[in-house]
Image (cartoon, rainbow, N blue to C red):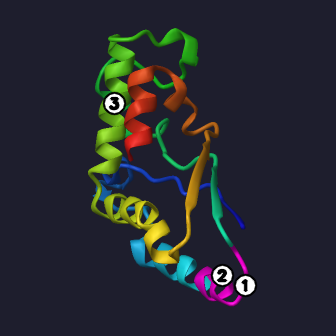
Amino acid sequence: MLIVMSDLHLADSGSYNLNGRRYNHNLPSEVYSSFFKEISEFIRDSEIESIDLVLAGDIFEITRSALWHDGQLRPYLHNDEIAEGSEAEAMLLRVMDSITNDERVDATLSIFRRLSAFYQKPVTLHFIPGNHDRLVNASQAVRTRVQSL
């Protein structure tokens, strides 16, 4: 079975301000739980042997993090401009940490990690970066961080 999801835009909640008021634009993890529960009813009634989950772009909201405003560095770099051990790589890792430290994002990623157990079938996760998270391929350290999530 193939499941395709895109445009989750998981973000660090500190990046979204409106007139000085901060808000968390990440959906509560219950939304994803409900989605996967709906699919489980179909899987239970079908002869599905395995599941491929494709995260098709803009899963992480890397380019709009407020952290980019802390210094001179901006997210408008090409992947080949980011060297191992560089300031840009360190910033990308900080942005990813900030995103995954958000309570809603952490709970959502936990759901993705437990899908095989939930469905009691093998789940293979595929990730295709989009324009908002294209920098996840900038270096081995960033790729490794994303894969560990």
What secondary structure is marked by label 3?
A: helix
Spot occupied by residue 137 in the image (x, y as percentages of width and height): 53, 27
Q: Which residue is labeled 1 in the image?
A: 46
- Answer left or right for 20 relative to 28: left
Q: Residue at x 59, y 82 (%)?
A: 40
Kind of residue at badge 2: Ile
Do residues under tags 3 and 2 come within 8 Å of each other at their CB atoms?
Answer: no
Front label number (3 vs 2) = 2
Q: Amino acid at mark 3?
A: Leu
Could you tell me how far apart the alpha carbons at marks 3 and 2 are, in whole angstroms?
A: 37 Å
Is residue 114 located in the magenta-colored stretch of the structure?
A: no
Give the image location of residue 4, x and y in percent.
69, 60
- Residue 65: quadrant of the picture: top left
Q: Is residue 32 left or right of residue 47?
A: left
Q: Residues within 10 Å of mark 2 (few under 14, many from 20)?
A: some
Under mark 1, the amino acid is Ser
Which of the 4 image quarters holds residue 89? top left
Q: Could you classify mark 1 by the number of other residues whose Cα lies within 10 Å: few (under 14), some (14-19), or many (20 or more)?
A: few
> Which secondary structure, mark 2?
helix
Q: Is there CB contact under 8 Å for labels 1 and 2?
A: yes
Mark 2, residue position: 43
Q: Position of residue 126 (x, y in %)?
A: 61, 48
| Near-viewer residue (42 or 15) | 42
Magenta: predominant secondary structure element?
A: helix
| Earlier-in-chain disc, 3 versus 1 | 1
Q: Which residue is mark 3?
A: 93
Are discs 3 and 1 less than 8 Å apart at CB? no
Q: Residue at x 47, y 13 (%)?
A: 82
Residue stretch in magenta: 39-48
